[in-house]
Amino acid sequence: MAELLVLTKHKSAPIIPYEFKRIDMVALKMLEINFKGWHCPIDSYVYMLNPDGSVMSGVCGNVYHTEWENPWWTLDELNKKDNQKKCVLRRGNCFCDSDINIPKAINKETYNWFLDNREDVLDVTLPIVEEGDNIIALSADMATVWSQVHFFIGRRCNFDCGYCPEDIHNNHSPNMTLDNFKHALNLINLERKRKKLFITGGEPTLNPEILNMVKHANSIDYKVVISTNGTAPVTRYTQLLEENATLHISFHGEFTNKKLIEKIASLEKYKDEITLKVMSLYDDKFAEDVRSIIPTDFELNYHPIYGKDLKHEFY
């Protein structure tokens, strides 16, 4: 399960020095921390391109660089807008793993201290966050936090999950062209050399150009990650994996069945390039069913659903 590195200060003893600890992603989300006003330079790390033409920093949409009035496909150049690195908490909480992983802190001073000292504890056994701890900074528990582009290439999907907002999926939207895909990536100028491209939807494997999209992204030095519901044929997944794409495969209780899970289990040869996301809490019956089929050497992550597993609704 994904872990975060956090900086804490005990609420009842503010004179205690900062202490580094760890917490897993689900436990962090369950705390529902209010990040509004935190120093969060997300516009240096994460971009999101949407089918409505908007380009924003953060899957949360903390900063909008352009919107539907000036869609990205009409632009020759994207003018980046600055938000003074403050979290505006547009959706009521920080809910996306990618956004949560970005280094952030209660203020710039704490942020700078956190960045200056975090590398010293990355390989150290640290205590787990406990009740009463006050989290004042956090980041992914890794040496390098990659720059990321999340490219929502279309709404077309063959699932209709009840918790998925209607405005981000349907079964009829046109597929994005390869030319538009290339144009969009050409607009993004990332500040860091190590960069990932997350191709999302909808269900991106429905796009007949998905393999060519991966090949183009590889040619401009992106590490490609594809979010998929697992319904594509094994041959399609094998082609993508052989092009060095990583697959984030999500299992959804409403539509995922035994046959689909068994198909994904057959890709065990590529287990190091596949992350499996179970869209439920760990102790849910659906999660138990997935564990009964998937080989134990696959990595399984559990993603509680807002509005279903978590009380807060964001859409």
Image (spheres, rainbow, N blue to C red):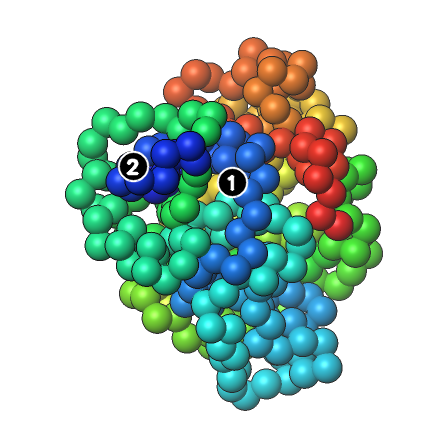
- Residue 134 numbered mark, or none: none
Where residue 175 appears, x then y in whole percent? Answer: 70, 62
Mark 1: which amino acid? His
Q: In the rendered view of the protein, which quadrant contains the N terminus?
A: top left
In-image side of 83 versus 222 (left or right): right
Element at label 2 = loop
The residue closer to the viewer here, 25 or 48, is 25
x, y percent for residue 112: 29, 59
Of circles 1 and 2, the one toward us is: 2
Look at 55% across and 35% down and name the residue there: 31
* Circles 1, 2 touching at the beta carbon (< 8 Å): no
Q: Nearer the viewer, residue 144 or 157?
A: 144
Q: Relative to 103, is 85 above or below?
A: below
Residue shown at 49%/42% (left/top)? Answer: 247
Q: Vertically, is 219 above or below 101?
A: below
Residue located beneath label 2 in the image: 16
Q: Is residue 121 above or below residue 196?
A: above
Residue 304 visible? The answer is yes
121 horizontally vs 236: left or right: left
Q: Residue furthest top?
A: 292
Q: Is residue 205 at all visible to an observer of this figure?
A: no
Of residues 315 and 110, the one drawn nearer to the viewer in this rendering: 110
Taking the spot 39% from the left edge, 70% from the top edge, the residue there is: 190
10 Å crowding of disc 2: few (<14), some (14-19), many (20+):
few
Q: Which amino acid does the dot numbered 2 rest on?
A: Ile
x, y (%) of residue 315? 75, 50
Residue at the limit of the structure toward the left, as seen here: 120
Distance between the Cα atoms at labels 1 and 2? 40 Å
Q: Which residue is mark 1?
A: 248
Residue placed most toward the observer, 272 or 77? 77
Please tell me whether mark 1 sits on a helix, a strand or a loop.
strand
Give the residue drawn at x 47%, y 73%: 84
